Structure formats: C-alpha cells, structure tokens
Image (cartoon, rainbow, N blue to C red):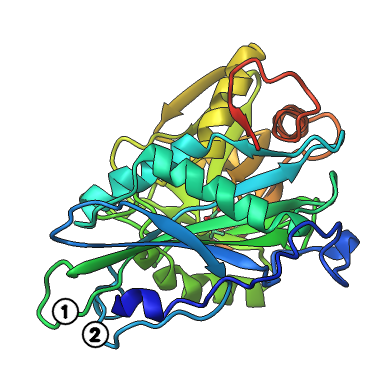
C-alpha cells in the first residue's frame, strides 16, 4: 500500500544484540533525544475501525500528508513509559504498561480515534524494547523511555476525524528529567495561564495539552524555576499539576494530591502507584481539592510522573513570596522514590504484579 511503501525498511543486519549503545555517556543522560535503531508502526483506516497488524521499522522520519488530522487539528495522543535493565542480566522490566494502554484507549474515545487493544499496545512496547535493547541504560544509570503516539495521519480538510490513523512507538535512553538531576526543584505558581478547564481535555494525554504550556514554562525557566504549577481555571485557588507531572503535598502524617474527578488533571500511572505505596506504608492519602493554602502550608511537596519519577520540591513561589519545604534523606518522597524504583528495577519483590518482564 501507499502507506507501507513510505515506511523505512528494516535493516537486514540486526545490530540490536550489541552490548552497548555506541559512544553514549551513560553517566550523563538527561532527557535529551538519543535516536535509537527501531520504531514500531501500525496503521488503520476509519472504515476498518481498529488496528490489525504492526511492524518494526528502522527509526527515521515518516511521511505525512500536509492535510493530516494531526497536523491541522491536533488529533493525537501520546504516552510515556520506561523499560529498566535488570541487574542480573535477566532481561528488562516494564512498569504497568497496561495502564498506559488503557489510558490511550480512554483518550482515543475523547479524540474520536480508534486505538490499539491492551494486548496490541503491550506487545508493540515489548517489540520496541527488544529491538532497541542495546539502548537500555545499565541499571542505576537511567531507563529506556518509550513514547507511544496515536495520530490522525489521514488527510482531511473540513473539521472531522481523520480517515486514517497511525500508532507508533519510538524509544530513547534517558536519565533524570530536570536539569537539577536528583536535586529538589523550585516551582512557580502560574496565575494567569491555565492548563485545563472543566469539560476540556486536561485529563487525557492529548498532544494539544502540551504546546500551550510552553510559554509559561519558558518564562519560568528564564527566572530559574524548573517548571510552573497550574491553578484551576474557575476559582484560581486550587492547585492542579505542573506542565509535566502531578503534585503531592505532605502535612504531618497526611498526604494529599489533587483529585482527577473534574477531568482537568492527568491521571498519572506514577501518581496512582505512589498513592498505593504511601497507603501501604500507613499514610492517609486523600485525593481531593488541594488549595493554595494547603500547598504553601505543607511540610513537604513532591512531583510524580514517568519522566520525572518522584522529584522533591524545595520551594514554591506564589504571588512573589517564596515558600520552603523539607527535602533530603528523611522525607516521604525519598522513601517512596526508593520503594518505587526498587520495584521498577526488579530490586525489590513486586507484590502487586505491577512489573512485566521482557
Ligand atoms: C511522562 O512523564 O512520561 C510524560 O509524558 C511527560 C512529558 C511532558 C515528558
């Protein structure tokens, strides 16, 4: 087919068995894009209604109509998950990939797109990791970040769902997300620009949630902040999330995180996992409205996400005043970070059945 002929062909020499990823400096991985060897591609038309078969292709540029739904109207979703190398040389570990698959299915409904089944999604992720296994960092140095995309790739002029869809996965080795590395970050509360509103798409991982937050993010970065925190668009009083991650506040033995029920907050897989781990550890965790007063009065604040992991927050600036929080060894965020990453890397027993071995 026309689609197929535009795909980069598989390299006849499979180099994926090589031990290391070329000249890469594993000790200084940030969140930059290191291109890897293969990507996974699966296409379907609107009439077909669903995806049937995908394949691995050499990683490279794709051909897209100038009038594709994704380029013109932003009909697209993305996901993010990580594969870790096991220390015993016994393969790789994925963390709750079915959750990403289900979130993509939910988002696809909102964005009028067909989506891969959970089985297709997880199979495609595994294929992508195996084909790029030489790029999975040594244990303790980072992870292979996996980026699934679902886009309206077919051509359309009037505003309507695209006639064809592409599900794609690429991967890149990553270390820490923020330039601060493992250190605590400074956040700025954004008061004018909002990330989401009730009835909008804040609760789904559509690509169109992300470009609008670039401006406040760039402004904040130029002032030395790692990211901005968004307030709810109605009352401008309740904290929602940062541009790239969810938020938790700790006060005494109580933990709170903004509830996702209004549809304005991205339901993070790390967020949900941290809620469960904190409860297992005896903490009371509430999913509720978190006001700006709750935030500035907290003992401890931290962010969660696939890319950011569990990142401590040292200060938050709101209306020109800087509020400081507890950081370091003796914090809940450090404890939860250790518990979570131990499970993800296969260092601790996975009593919850969260990990998937490849
Ligand atoms: C992730 O944490 O995987 C995300 O998708 C956030 C993105 C802004 C890097």
Placement of 173 over or under 58, stated as above or below: above
Q: Position of residue 165 (x, y in %)?
A: 28, 65
Q: Position of residue 104 (x, y in %)?
A: 37, 48
64 sits left or right of 339 in the view: left
**Residue 312, picture quadrant:** top right
Residue 307 seen anywhere in this rendered image of the structure: no
Residue at horizontal 45 percent and vertical 36 percent from the top: 99
Residue at horizontal 64 percent and vertical 11 percent from the top: 282
Q: In this figure, what is the number of numbered marks?
A: 2
Q: Could you say which disc has been placed on residue 67 in the image?
A: 2
Please rate how many residues cluster around mark 2, counting C-alpha atoms within 10 Å: few if below 14, some from 14 to 19, many from 20: some
Quarter the N terminus occupies: bottom left
Instruction: Check contact, mark 2 vs mark 1: CB within 8 A.
Output: yes
Residue at horizontal 85 percent and vertical 45 percent from the top: 140
For label 1, being within 8 Å of ligand 1 is answered no
Disc 1 marks which residue? 156
**Residue 151, picture quadrant:** bottom left
**Residue 181, picture quadrant:** bottom right
Q: Residue furthest bottom?
A: 66
Q: Secondary structure at mark 1?
A: loop
Q: Position of residue 166 (x, y in %)?
A: 34, 65
Q: Of the two numbered discs 2 and 1 on the same chain, state the one appearing first in sequence.
A: 2
137 sits left or right of 63 in the view: right
What's the distance in space between the residues labelled 2 and 1, CA to CA?
6 Å
Of 277 and 224, the residue lying toward us: 277
Residue at horizontal 33 percent and vertical 76 percent from the top: 3
Quarter the C terminus occupies: top right
Q: Position of residue 113 (x, y in %)?
A: 23, 57
Placement of 357 over or under 165, stated as above or below: above
Please rate how many residues cluster around mark 1, counting C-alpha atoms within 10 Å: few if below 14, some from 14 to 19, many from 20: many
């Amino acid at each position: 087919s026309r689609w197929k002929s535009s795909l980069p062909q598989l390299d006849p020499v499979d180099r994926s068995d090589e031990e290391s990823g070329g000249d890469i400096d594993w000790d200084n991985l940030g969140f930059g894009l290191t291109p890897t060897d293969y990507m996974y591609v699966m296409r379907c038309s609107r009439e077909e209604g669903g995806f049937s078969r995908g394949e691995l292709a050499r990683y490279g540029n794709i051909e897209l109509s100038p009038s594709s739904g994704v380029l013109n109207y932003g009909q697209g979703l993305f996901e993010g998950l990580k594969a870790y190398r096991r220390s015993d040389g016994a393969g790789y570990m994925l963390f709750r990939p079915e959750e990403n698959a289900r979130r993509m299915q939910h988002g696809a409904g909102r964005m009028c797109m067909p989506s891969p089944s959970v089985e297709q999604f997880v199979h495609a992720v595994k294929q992508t990791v195996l084909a790029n296994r030489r790029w999975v960092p040594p244990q303790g140095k980072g992870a292979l970040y996996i980026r699934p995309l679902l886009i309206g790739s077919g051509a359309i002029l009037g505003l309507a769902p695209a006639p064809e869809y592409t599900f794609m996965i690429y991967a890149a080795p990553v270390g820490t997300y923020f330039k601060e590395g493992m250190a605590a970050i400074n956040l700025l509360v954004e008061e004018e620009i909002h990330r989401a509103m009730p009835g909008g798409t804040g609760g789904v991982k559509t690509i169109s949630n992300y470009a609008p937050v670039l401006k406040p993010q760039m402004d904040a970065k130029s002032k030395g902040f790692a990211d901005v925190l968004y307030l709810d668009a109605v009352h401008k009083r309740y904290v929602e999330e940062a541009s790239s991650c969810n938020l938790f506040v700790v006060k005494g033995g109580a933990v709170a995180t903004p509830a996702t029920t209004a549809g304005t907050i991205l339901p993070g897989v790390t967020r949900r996992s941290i809620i469960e781990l904190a409860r297992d550890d005896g903490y009371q965790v509430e999913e509720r409205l978190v006001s700006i007063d709750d935030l500035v009065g907290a003992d401890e604040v931290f962010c969660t996400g696939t890319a950011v992991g569990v990142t401590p927050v040292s200060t938050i600036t709101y209306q020109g005043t800087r509020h400081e929080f507890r950081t370091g060894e003796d914090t809940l965020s450090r404890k939860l970070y250790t518990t979570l990453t131990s499970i993800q890397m296969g260092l601790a027993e996975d009593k919850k059945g969260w990990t998937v071995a490849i």
